[in-house]
Image (cartoon, rainbow, N blue to C red):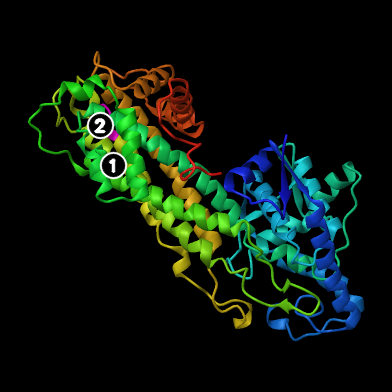
Amino acid sequence: MKTFHYGEDSLTAGIALDLCKGTVKGMVSEAAGKRIRMSHEHVMSVIRSHKTVYGINTGFGPLCTTKISDEDIQKLQLNLLRSHSVGVGQLIPPEISKLMLILKVHALARGYSGISPETILRIIWHIDEDIIPCVPSQGSVGASGDLAPLAHLFLPLIGSGEIWYRGRAYPAGEILRKHGVEALVLGPKEGLALINGTQFISAFGIKVLERFQHCLDLADITASFNLEALMGSVKTFDEELHQLRPYAGSAYVARRMRTLLDKSEIVESHKNCTRVQDPYSLRCIPQVHGASRDAWLHLKEMLHTEINSVTDNPILFSEDKIITGGNFHGQPIALPLDYATLAAAEMGNIADRRIYLSLMEKVEGLPKLLMRDTGLNSGFMILQYTTAALASENKCLCFPASADSIPTSLGQEDHVSMGSISARKALQVVDNLEKILGIELFSASQGFEFRKPLKSGLLLEACFKHIRTKIAFADSDHILTEEIDRAINMVRNKELTSLTADLAKEKKIIFKNETDELFGIY
């Protein structure tokens, strides 16, 4: 098993997900352990010297001028976790809670937070044993850290809160006793170090990055099916054309489309047709898909900076240099998440337009509503209503959460990022996008079949063959829910993107996918 060294190695979204799955083992190196102990000693020196330092021997937020006695310092940290555990709403998925733990350990192991080695080892125990705290989804404003979610995340350290265990939520104390593990007594600054940070936003961001990347890859495939069904032109994917406007995303999409449609008999069959140009939803696939790729790339770059950063406060450089700063503010990641939300919504928008276009009987051989005997049959008419509803819902979710700020902490924290809302909304939009792409997959494969016996490119034909093992051609009206669900599951299981990646590797076709360095998650 590969090993990742917390606080030492560079973390990526892909590695974080591997740590979460248990395919990579996380550990603290000797060098990181030394830094952790030294940082912890800086805190203890402050206590011994009786210097007043925020968060170590003072109250929090607007109570920062209230000095705490030595005998109450431990109780201060206990009270901090308890008082900040005010989250509401549905519990977030255990995978995201686990990612939060991983990101927090990596940040603490950098050695600037004053946390004790014992506390870090306990968090790693939770990760390794897959005993994951329950965290409510709402309550963070994304500045001064994700305070409420992180407080809930670390309640089990003091024997409180709830834990996911074997698929169910249990009282943390019950599970700890079952494993012979005692609650910790938090030392000076430890509670503050645990709850300051952007790990809630960033954990959601990792899932957005992973699932949105797959949607982008799949959208090129579903668009190719619709382009073939509608007998669209491939000239718009010309390499020289995209060199004149050299955005990384559009060039990448154009290359993928050329590969998907390479040696297509369908393309050859209408090579000399009199159609001048296609509607934008076909002609501008590289520009629209590519712009969303570039937004995804911006999120990746910002997220990878964030998850390798120290987002605590105060930060301890030495016993004499302790800085109260704003590294916990979620703005640097909130803005890219809002941008990615818009980019994901636009992918759903253009997919819905392609579905609508395919129903219009605009191209010879493609019947109205993708069914021959319409009138008696409504065909795929109402299926597009669903994508329209999903696309519209996504538009409503596109208002940037980061555009809002409500003062908190009696005005001490007078500008907050709302990045936690940005992160949750982004994942909602991606979830809807997966549904839209599943429906495009279903409808586009129906249209594609009308081009038989002509064949498309090798990769698309392999995808079509796989689709037909699960979804049959529809020749009359029936309840479509089951086929829609199968198509959406195909999307979420990454069946077609895995198939094309494996086949391209086998046939030595240059068709970069998950392993692409620029547009990959590692």
The amino acid on which the numbered mark 1 sits, given as a three-letter code, is: Ile
Residue tagged 1: 285
**Side (left or right) of 493 relative to 389:** right
Q: Is residue 393 visible?
A: no
The amino acid on which the numbered mark 2 sits, given as a three-letter code, is: Leu
Residue tagged 2: 227
Tell me where the magenta segment starts and ends, as one range.
378-382
Label disc, if present, on residue 415 of the rendered structure: none
**Alpha-carbon distance for marks 2 and 1?**
10 Å
Q: Are marks 2 and 1 in contact (CB under 8 Å)?
A: yes
The answer to which quarter of the image holds residue 161 is bottom right
The answer to which quarter of the image holds residue 412 is bottom right
Q: Residue extending furthest top?
A: 453
Marked residue nearer the N-terminal end (2 or 1): 2
**Which of 492 and 509 lies nearest the eye of the viewer?**
509
- Residue 335, placed above or below residue 322: above
Is disc 2 surrounded by few (<14), some (14 to 19) or many (20+) residues within 10 Å? many
**Tally of numbered discs:** 2
Residue 174's x, y, as percent? Answer: 85, 46
Residue 385's x, y, as percent? Answer: 30, 39
**Magenta part mainly helix, strand or loop?**
loop
